[in-house]
């Protein structure tokens, strides 16, 4: 069993900053890739950023240079620092993680419940 808790969303003005957090707990041996996705009303879910267990990152073109993904492996937590926020960043943000229960098992993808980010004047 795995549980995620997301936090950090809210209402900010354009140009502002937010930091999202997502902590996984439960019977976890290790976590491979962790990431953030977002979905605005009427739009498809899109990748925001990913980070491997070794720290390799990947960003969507729309957020590169403004957002930073990081993780704390000891806490099974992934973060998304969002700077220079724009109105088009408004969406529900979802974390995910590829969880390994035992040393030799495959990974299973779990999703957080989502946290709303609204950028508006």
Image (spheres, grey):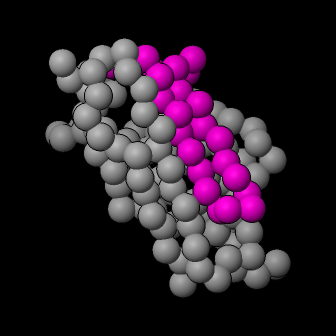
- Which image quadrant for residue 85? top left
107, above or below 17, in the image: below
For the C terminus, the quadrant is top left
* Percent position of residue 61, x then y: 51, 21
Q: Magenta stretch containing residue 84, yes or no?
A: yes
For the N terminus, the quadrant is bottom right
Given residues 82 and 104, the one toward you in this image is 82
61, above or below 53, in the image: above
Q: Residue at x 47, y 22 (%)?
A: 83
85, above or below 68, in the image: above
Q: Magenta stretch containing residue 24, yes or no?
A: no
Residue 72 visible within the image: yes
* Percent position of residue 18, x then y: 42, 33
On the rendered structure, is 68 left or right of 21? right
On the rendered structure, is 69 left or right of 120? right
Q: Residue at x 37, y 15 (%)?
A: 15
Report the number of numbered marks. 0
118, above or below 3, in the image: above
Given residues 57 and 121, the one toward you in this image is 121
* Percent position of residue 84, x then y: 43, 17
* Percent position of residue 7, x then y: 41, 53
- Which image quadrant for residue 38? top left
Q: Residue at x 67, y 48 (%)?
A: 71
The residue range painted magenta reads 62-86
Residue 92 visible within the image: no
């Amino acid at each position: 069993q795995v549980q995620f808790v997301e936090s950090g969303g809210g209402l900010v003005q354009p140009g502002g900053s937010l930091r999202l957090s997502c902590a996984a707990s439960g019977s976890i041996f290790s976590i491979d890739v962790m990431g953030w996705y977002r979905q605005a009303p009427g739009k498809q879910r899109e990748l925001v950023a990913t980070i491997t267990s070794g720290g390799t990152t990947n960003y969507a073109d729309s957020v590169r240079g403004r957002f930073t993904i990081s993780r704390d492996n000891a806490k099974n937590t992934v973060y998304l620092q969002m700077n220079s926020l724009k109105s088009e960043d408004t969406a529900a943000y979802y974390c995910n993680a590829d969880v390994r229960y035992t040393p030799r098992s495959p990974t299973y993808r779990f999703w957080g419940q989502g946290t709303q980010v609204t950028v508006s004047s």
